[in-house]
Amino acid sequence: MFKFRLTKKRFGLLLLILSLGFGILAYFLKDQIVYLQNLGYMGLFIANLLGSATILLPLPSFATTIAAGAFLNPVLAGIFSATGSTIGELTGYYAGRGGEELIKKDKNIKRVQKWMDKYGLWVVFVLAAVPNPLFDLAGIISGASHIPVRKYLIAVLSGKLIKFILLAYLGFGVLKIFHYAF
């Protein structure tokens, strides 16, 4: 009889495979994600969750927040976007948790790791607040470094609230400009 033991290494590999699989699925559904903004705040939440679930593959989640900010309350649009995006970032965190041996060789990861060693979760906060391609690396490193998930989520949500509320107000401002111009 075959007996399967879920060791720490196998559990890590399972987390890595699930995180990457979910990210790939979200990437292939990217065209449908844009239409979720038509569902209001919940659609915005789901669009940003899926948009952030991809690891190193960009999806149009910023565009949905900007567009929604033009028609929904910008603060609530930013909050729902940031919350969905924060939960979606768990894929990178758990990919790092599961694949910590695989990621130690990348030079970009080493650079972000040095920043995190020096400044801690402030790096996660800043990278979450500013649109950039390095955020996924910070999530992966956070998971690989075994930073408590609660602390990671607080840093991510804090940064993303700033970013997404500003993006939603950008959409709100564009609507106002067009309203007065035409």
Image (cartoon, rainbow, N blue to C red):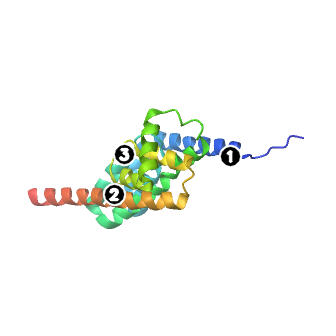
Instruction: Looking at the picture, tell me which residue is in the foreground, 12 or 65.
Output: 12
Q: In this rendering, is residue 77 above or below 11?
A: below
The amino acid type, in three-letter code, at marker 2 is: Phe
- Would residue 141 appear left or right of 173 to someone viewing this image? right
User: Could you tell me if the residues under marks 1 and 2 are in contact, i.e. CB atoms within 8 Å?
Assistant: no
Q: Residues within 10 Å of mark 1 (few under 14, many from 20)?
A: some
Tell me the CA gap for discs 1 and 2. Answer: 33 Å
SS category of the residue bearing label 3: loop
**Of tags 1 and 3, which is closer to the observer?**
1
Q: In this rendering, is residue 56 above or below 162?
A: above
The residue identified by callout 3 is 60
User: Could you tell me if the residues under marks 1 and 3 are in contact, i.e. CB atoms within 8 Å?
Assistant: no
**Of the image marks 1 and 3, the number of the one nearer the N terminus:** 1
The residue identified by callout 1 is 11
- Would residue 17 appear left or right of 156 to someone viewing this image? right
Tell me the CA gap for discs 1 and 3. Answer: 31 Å
Farthest right residue in view: 1
Residue drawn at 60 percent across, 42 percent down = 16
Q: Residues within 10 Å of mark 3 (few under 14, many from 20)?
A: some
Residue drawn at 29 percent across, 64 percent down = 74
Farthest front residue in view: 118
Residue drawn at 45 percent across, 56 percent down = 86
The residue identified by callout 2 is 164
Indicate which disc residue 144 carries. Answer: none
The amino acid type, in three-letter code, at marker 3 is: Pro
**Of the image marks 1 and 2, the number of the one nearer the N terminus:** 1
**Of tags 2 and 3, which is closer to the observer?**
2
Q: Position of residue 69 (x, y in %)?
A: 29, 60
